[in-house]
C-alpha cells in the first residue's frame, strides 16, 4: 500500500511516517517546508513539498503519485494565534480549503482518506464524554470552527474516509505541553496549571498505530481516539509527568479564569468517548501513564 502523509514535520505526521516504515509500507511525506527536517527515522522516505491550499498543485501531486490512502495530519494548530484577524484567512485556507483539496483528489483517484480533528469542535458543556457520533457542535474558538468545517468537507466529499478526533496531543517531534512544562519545571520552584479543563492526553506514537491500522479497515466513519486510563485535568497530567521525570517543582492548581493568559476560549469538558473504536475492531490506545513513561524515555528530555 502506498500512503501519502501530510504534515510530516509536525508531531503526528512524523510518527505516522515512522509507523508506516516500521510496517514496511510505502510512505511518502509532505509538508510546506523545502525538506523533511525531523528525526533521522523518516529521512529515507520520499518527501514532497506541497502547498495544500493550491488546488492545482494538490491535484498534480496526488494524481502523479496515485496513493492508496492519504493521512491528513497537516493543520494550523496555533489556537491562540488563530484568533488574530490577520491570521484567519491563512487558518481557513489550511484547515478548510486545504482539506477540501486533498479530500477531493483522494476521492477522484479512489484513495482512502484519514482526517485528524479535535475535541475543540465541541463546546465543552457538562461533564459527560462526547460520543463519536455526537452532532452537538459548538466550537468556542476559530481553530475549532475551521476543524469542524474540515470535518464537514470530508463527510461531503469522501465516501471512504475516517475522521479521528483527538485531544491534548504530545509527541517527540515538536513543541507540546509536556516539553514546555518540563522546561519550566527545571527552572522554577513552582508552576501554575489549569485544573478545571478535563480530558485525556494522546501520545502521537500510539495514535499513529491506530491510524495505520485504519488503512486496512472498511469501517469508515468518525472516531474518538485518546490514550486510555481515565479523564484528568492539565494539573493532574503535569503532576504525573513531573513525578515520573523526578521533578520536585510545586504544581499549583488554578482555574481557567485565574490562569487568564489564553486569547482563545477552551472547552472545560474535553472528555471523548472512545468506545466506538473497540466496537469496530480497533485497539484502544494504551494507558496515558504508560504513554508518558515511554515518551520520557524515547524523547530523552
Image (cartoon, rainbow, N blue to C red):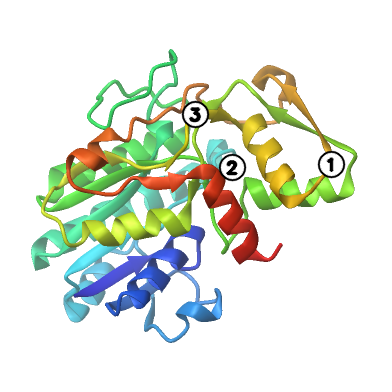
Q: In this image, 84 relative to 235: left or right?
A: left
Residue drawn at point x = 9 percent, y = 63 percent: 108
Q: Residue 134 falls in which quadrant of the image?
A: top left
Q: Residue 38 falls in which quadrant of the image?
A: bottom right
Q: Is residue 67 above or below residue 119?
A: below
Q: Which label's residue is closer to the chain start, 1 or 3?
A: 3
Q: CA distance from mark 2 to mark 1?
A: 32 Å
Can you tell which mark lies on residue 231?
3
Residue 191 visible in the snapshot: yes
Foreground residue among 288 and 71:
288
Q: CA distance from mark 2 to mark 3?
A: 27 Å
Q: Which label's residue is closer to the chain start, 2 or 3?
A: 2
Q: In front: mark 2 or mark 1?
A: 1
| Residue ID for mark 1 | 248
Residue drawn at point x = 15 percent, y = 56 percent: 217
> Measured from the top left, where is residue 224 in percent x and y?
32, 38
User: Dot 1: within a 10 Å radius of its alpha carbon, few (fewer than 14), some, or many (20 or more) residues?
Assistant: few
| Residue ID for mark 2 | 81
In the rendered image, which quarter contains the C terminus?
bottom right
Amino acid at each position: 500500500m502506498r500512503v501519502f502523509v501530510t504534515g510530516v514535520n509536525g508531531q503526528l505526521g512524523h510518527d505516522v511516517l515512522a509507523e508506516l516504515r516500521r510496517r514496511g509500507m510505502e510512505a511518502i511525506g509532505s509538508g510546506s517546508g523545502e525538506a523533511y527536517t525531523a528525526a533521522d527515522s523518516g529521512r529515507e522516505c520520499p518527501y514532497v513539498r506541497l502547498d495544500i491550499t493550491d488546488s492545482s498543485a494538490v491535484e498534480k501531486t496526488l494524481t502523479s503519485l496515485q496513493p492508496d490512502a492519504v493521512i491528513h495530519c497537516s493543520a494550523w494548530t496555533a489556537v491562540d494565534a488563530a484568533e488574530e484577524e490577520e491570521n484567519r484567512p491563512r487558518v481557513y485556507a489550511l484547515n478548510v480549503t486545504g482539506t477540501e483539496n486533498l479530500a477531493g483528489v483522494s476521492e477522484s483517484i479512489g484513495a482512502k482518506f484519514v482526517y485528524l480533528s479535535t475535541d475543540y469542535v465541541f463546546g465543552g458543556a457538562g461533564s459527560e464524554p462526547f460520543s463519536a457520533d455526537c452532532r452537538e457542535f459548538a466550537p468556542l474558538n476559530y481553530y475549532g470552527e475551521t476543524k469542524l468545517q474540515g470535518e464537514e468537507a470530508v463527510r461531503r466529499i469522501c465516501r471512504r474516509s475516517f475522521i479521528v478526533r483527538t485531544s491534548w496531543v504530545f509527541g517527540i517531534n515538536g513543541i507540546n505541553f509536556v516539553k514546555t512544562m518540563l522546561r519550566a519545571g527545571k527552572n522554577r520552584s513552582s508552576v501554575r496549571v489549569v485544573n478545571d479543563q478535563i480530558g485525556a492526553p494522546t501520545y502521537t506514537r500510539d495514535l499513529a498505530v491506530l491510524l495505520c491500522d485504519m488503512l486496512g479497515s472498511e469501517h469508515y466513519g468518525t472516531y474518538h481516539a485518546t490514550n486510555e486510563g481515565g479523564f484528568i485535568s492539565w494539573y493532574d497530567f503535569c503532576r504525573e509527568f513531573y513525578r515520573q521525570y523526578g521533578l520536585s517543582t510545586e504544581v499549583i492548581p488554578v482555574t481557567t479564569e485565574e490562569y487568564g493568559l489564553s486569547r482563545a476560549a477552551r472547552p472545560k469538558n474535553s472528555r471523548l468517548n472512545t468506545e466506538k473504536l473497540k466496537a469496530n475492531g480497533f485497539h484502544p490506545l494504551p494507558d496515558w501513564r504508560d504513554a508518558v513513561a515511554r515518551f520520557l524515555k524515547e524523547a530523552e528530555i
